[in-house]
């Protein structure tokens, strides 16, 4: 016998429609309403499993205006399940605003385990340790993207990217990280699912004529001090430090030759 909650966060398949749990189907059938990122997308899933629960739209463009209505429905004794178009809600999907208000109003919430592109991808990618940083969708501006790449040089960095932007993003990564190793997954759980682990140059060559499908990517961590020093040089320069000051600071921090660091500084 399952414990009954008022609000359920329910994962849905990321590609293969059969990747949904029996519990998720039971919840979607039993709640009074389903809050959907896109009602049309969710309806395809509901039709497949003959689920007739009423739906309403809850997405990033209406999440703030919809909160009071959702709270009112729940306080009237009804139950709601939140779903996104694919995968687990709250992972790069709307819901944070609502969840905060639910907690403030002491409304019971539970989350079901299920499909998620990050874990599906990482379970197929060999790594030396379990540490990684997920940063969501890769930034659209070059400056924000560059800062992110520089920030996580010593940690495996995982991100989502669109097929029309991935090559430019890989070029930006190479400009900072050099010939780094990349893991790239596309069309996860679908017929043409593919995981590629290779050098960044080889991956760019492989997909030079284009790539299809939603993408999850990981930049492997590097212990190369040169990358870290280059990043710190730029940050210190932006803060107004002089070349000799930067050389002194970084040579002490990284226990490297001061003159070598100074040469790097004047080349930046």
Image (cartoon, rainbow, N blue to C red):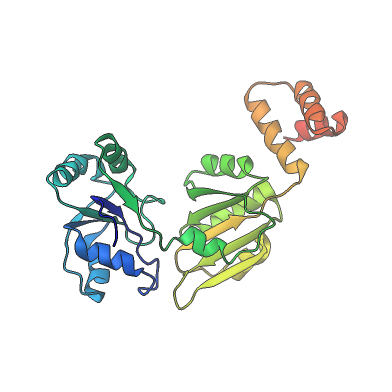
Question: Which image quarter holds the C terminus?
Answer: top right
Left or right of 56 in this view: 242: right
Left or right of 237 in this view: 18: left
Name the residue: 21% across, 41% down: 67
Left or right of 265 in this view: 152: left
Q: Position of residue 141 (x, y in %)?
A: 49, 43
Query: Which residue sits furthest bottom?
Result: 191
Q: Nearer the viewer, residue 165 or 13?
A: 13
Q: Nearer the viewer, residue 143 or 15?
A: 15
As displayed, is residue 134 above or below residue 45? Answer: above
Query: Which residue sits furthest left?
Result: 76
As displayed, is residue 20 above or below residue 254? Answer: below
Left or right of 77 in this view: 248: right
Residue 242 visible to the viewer: yes
As displayed, is residue 112 above or below residue 262? Answer: below
Q: Nearer the viewer, residue 171 or 53?
A: 53
Name the residue: 67% across, 27% down: 237
Residue 40 visible to the viewer: no
Q: Position of residue 222 (x, y in %)?
A: 71, 49
Name the residue: 38% across, 57% down: 88
Q: Position of residue 30 (x, y in %)?
A: 20, 63
């Amino acid at each position: 016998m399952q414990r009954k909650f008022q609000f359920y966060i329910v994962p849905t398949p990321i590609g293969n429609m059969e990747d949904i749990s029996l519990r998720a189907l039971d919840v979607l059938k039993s709640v009074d309403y389903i809050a959907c990122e896109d009602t049309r997308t969710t309806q395809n899933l509901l039709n497949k499993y003959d689920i007739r629960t009423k739906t309403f739209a809850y997405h990033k463009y209406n999440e703030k205006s919809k909160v009071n209505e959702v709270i009112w429905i729940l306080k009237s004794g009804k139950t709601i399940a939140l779903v996104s178009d694919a995968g687990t809600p709250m992972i790069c999907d709307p819901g944070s605003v609502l969840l905060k208000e639910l907690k403030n109003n002491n409304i019971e919430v539970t989350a079901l385990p299920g499909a998620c592109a990050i874990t599906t991808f990482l379970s197929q990618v060999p790594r030396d340790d379990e540490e990684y940083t997920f940063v969501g969708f890769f930034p659209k501006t070059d400056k924000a993207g560059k800062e992110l790449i520089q920030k996580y040089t010593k940690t495996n960095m995982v991100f989502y990217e669109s097929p029309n932007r991935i090559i430019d993003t890989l070029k930006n990564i190479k400009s900072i990280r050099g010939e780094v190793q990349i893991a790239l997954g596309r069309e996860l759980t679908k017929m043409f699912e593919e995981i590629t682990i290779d050098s960044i140059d080889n991956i760019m060559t492989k997909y030079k004529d284009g790539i299809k499908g939603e993408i999850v990517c990981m930049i492997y961590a590097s212990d190369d001090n040169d990358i870290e020093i280059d990043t710190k040089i730029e940050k210190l320069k932006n803060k107004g430090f002089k070349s000799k000051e930067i050389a002194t600071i970084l040579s002490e921090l990284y226990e490297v030759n001061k003159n070598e660091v100074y040469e790097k500084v004047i080349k930046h």
